[in-house]
Image: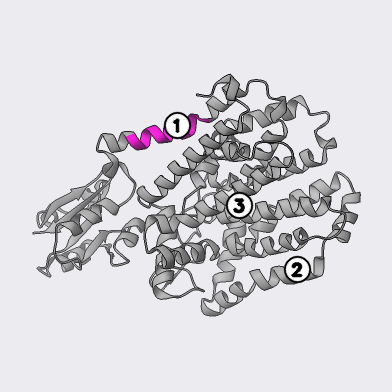
Amino acid sequence: MISEKLKNNSKILSISVSIILIFRLLLTITIPLLDKTESRYAEIARIMQETKQWIILQIDYGVPFWAKPPLSTWLSAGSFEIFGVNEFAARFPSFLLSVILIIIAGKMVKKDGYSFYLPGFILLTMPEFLIHTGVVSTDTSLEFCITIMMISFWKTMQSETKTYWNYLFFIALGFGFLAKGPLITVLTFPPLFIWCCLDLQRFKAVFSKFSIIPGIVITAIIGLPWYYFCEQQSPGFLDYFIVGEHYKRFLEPGWKGDLYGSGHSQPKGMIWLLMIAFMFPWILVVLYKLWKNKATILKNNWLSFLIVWAFWTPLFFTISSNILHTYLLPSAMPIMFLVVHFWEELKRKKLLLNVALFFPTVVFIAYFALFATGKFDNQMNSDKYLLRDIKATTENKEIPIYYWKSKHYSGQFYSNGKAQVIQTEKQLDSVLTLNKKLFFVIQTKEQKEISKKQLDKMTLTQSNYKTSIFVTK
């Protein structure tokens, strides 16, 4: 893929980064919102934009969503205001934040003589980062805030006097509370404390170079008002969010108190295997170089700073059974900086760059293969095409749509919130007696729960690999 002569050439890196970014942007436009997570957050943002209720997040009309703070929802809802309600608008803030991080990293390494495009290449060939470059979730905004905090801390500590980086640290902390709550402090303060413990003189520098009292005020002004107004308008939010989401979720395997899903129970320590898989191949490079230089790594200030930043997150989640690979995203930036730090020492760059391109290439091939074989619509974990097709064959777009047992979030989004739910056979009988044209969305595996008598009153009209839509006869 990359010749030996071009392995250090900025041009080939710039071409690779540009192609991957363009392809990733294409995915944000053409891939439907996927169930459950992505379409759920997009639907919450759609309801916010429609109702103009900017304080209480709603998972359905009148149903509060207490699980997450509002920053990513505000960004997607604001994007809907500008670009209209569609997949691209929902995902664009995440894409933009990732691109900004790539630019910041590029400017930082360029000052040390590296290619501006090297960080972008490393990040965009890292599965975890590439996936989140254009996904509707809270993780990208959290990663952005953590990165700005950590870079600001480092810049402040390296300066002779107080600089704007000092205040940017507290600004990012405030927005971090709006991105994912108190978790921002859990993922940043401990590694910073550990790094300072490696040289106790750093504690003195912290108090002399940071405007702590004004900084706390800045953080409070940015981050706390929403929490107050949310609890006032939706009592019970703080108890669920602070105790449930920030204690029980991480310490109770298979936590049963989740109002919006279920705990993601995994064996303790699984986070490290996920790290190897979703940060391949760069994590292997980092681990190898750290082992080879284990006698001196803590003597280098920047290297030790990156190590505690990169590995604190997986270390923290080692004690939790409720984990997802997305929890690793805050480690992507320091892993990238570690690779850049060791870049000149790497001898087989050609092989490494070729291996790194494996994941983006597989995604590229899979994407166009699905289009070429005509299986794209059928294989997506989304109800977009099913709902689009039934609307295309009817003149009355207000024909009621009912889901059996529970709505898919993509169904809510693509029906503009008009989808309804039927949970019992009695309710189904009642609706079928209306003698009106109705659509019923049923998961294929749940069709056996409906009696033959009821199914005989319907005709299959659309289906994909997991869902079918019936119309009343």
The reply to whether dot 2 and dot 1 touch (C-beta < 8 Å) is no
Which of the two labelled residues, at mark 2 and mark 1, occupies the earlier sequence position?
2
Question: Would residue 186 be counted in the magenta stretch?
Answer: no
Q: Is residue 95 left or right of residue 248?
A: left
Q: Secondary structure at mark 2?
A: helix
Q: Which residue does the numbered mark 2 point to in the structure image?
A: 216
Residue 119: which quarter of the image?
top right
Is residue 447 shown to the viewer in this render?
yes
Name above or below for residue 327 compared with residue 86.
Answer: above
- Front in this rendered view, residue 78 or 199: 78
Q: Residue at x 52, y 35 (%)?
A: 15
Amino acid bearing label 1: Thr
The quarter of the rendered structure image containing the C terminus is bottom left
Q: Which residue does the numbered mark 3 point to in the structure image?
A: 143
Which of the two labelled residues, at mark 3 and mark 1, occupies the earlier sequence position?
3
Q: Secondary structure at mark 3?
A: helix
* x then y, percent, for residue 138: 53, 56
C-alpha distance separating marks 3 and 1 = 25 Å
Which of the two labelled residues, at mark 3 and mark 2, occupies the earlier sequence position?
3
* x then y, percent, for residue 72: 52, 61
Mark 2 neighbour density, 10 Å: few (under 14) some (14–19) many (20 or more): some
Q: Residue at x 56, y 54 (%)?
A: 97
Q: Which residue does the numbered mark 1 point to in the structure image?
A: 361
Is residue 270 shown to the viewer in this render?
no
Amino acid bearing label 2: Ile
Question: Would residue 362 be counted in the magenta stretch?
Answer: yes
| Residue bounds of the magenta highlight | 357-368
